[in-house]
Image: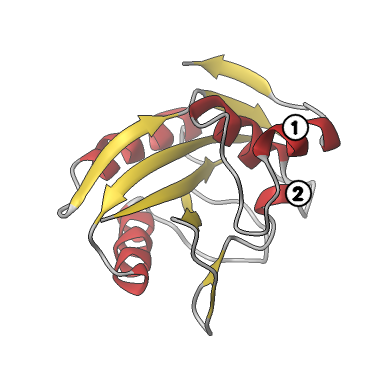
Amino acid sequence: MSLVYIGLGANLDEPQQQLEQALTELAQLPNCHLLAQSSLYHSKPVGPQDQPDYINAVALLKTDLEPLALLDTLQQLEQDHGRVRKRHWGERTLDLDILLIDNLIIESERLTIPHPFAQQRSFVVYPLAEITPTLIFPDGKHVEQLLTELDNDLIRIHA
């Protein structure tokens, strides 16, 4: 069984409801158990600024799915929520990113773990710190240290 952190984001079609529904669906995935979920956070978009603000969260799952099988499952969940990839870092009904899997480092054509931008984004680091304040990335960086390096430009919606 692996511990997996999933980043969730949405900014279209009732994004708060999209995330709440996705968290419910993550808890019901076969071979997965939802261990924790962060509060929901309101954040500004990364990339094109002509899109709505985002709602973000992080979930912690325990799973026996292999990394690519988990990726396929999450991408299917995105499609079930009407995800259409129109432009890079563009608007979306649901975005599910695998942030970390145990202490693994994976670099393949389809999957990079840890997520390459996880340590640079407040909407990932703050929710991660909320659910696992002692988290250490595979490169040895502590989530507590990352908090001091990033602006807290988030608005916490609810726990």
Counting residues from the N terminus, which is met first, the one under dot 2 or under dot 1?
2
Kindly state the secondary structure of the residue where label 1 is placed.
helix
Q: Position of residue 10 (x, y in %)?
A: 52, 42
Which quarter of the figure is the N terminus placed in?
Answer: bottom left
- Nearer the viewer's eye, disc 2 or disc 1? 1
Badge 1 amino acid:
Leu
The residue under the point 23% across, 60% down is 64
Seen in the picture, residue 27 relative to 80 is either above or below; the reply is above
In front: 77, or 33?
A: 33
Q: Is residue 53 visible?
A: no
Q: Which residue is mark 2?
A: 120
User: Which residue is most to the left?
Assistant: 30
In front: 130, or 135?
A: 135
The crowd level at tag 2 (other Cα within 10 Å; few <14, some 14-19, many 20+) is few
Seen in the picture, residue 70 relative to 127 is either above or below; the reply is below
Q: Position of residue 24 (x, y in %)?
A: 27, 35
The residue under the point 28% across, 38% down is 34
Q: Is residue 81 visible?
A: yes
In front: 30, or 144?
A: 144
User: In screen coordinates, is 41 left or right of 31?
Assistant: right
Q: Mark on residue 47?
A: none
Kindly state the secondary structure of the residue where label 2 is placed.
helix
User: In screen coordinates, is 30 left or right of 15?
Assistant: left
Q: Position of residue 72 (x, y in %)?
A: 33, 69
The residue under the point 18% across, 42% down is 28
Q: Which residue is mark 1?
A: 147
Badge 2 amino acid:
Gln
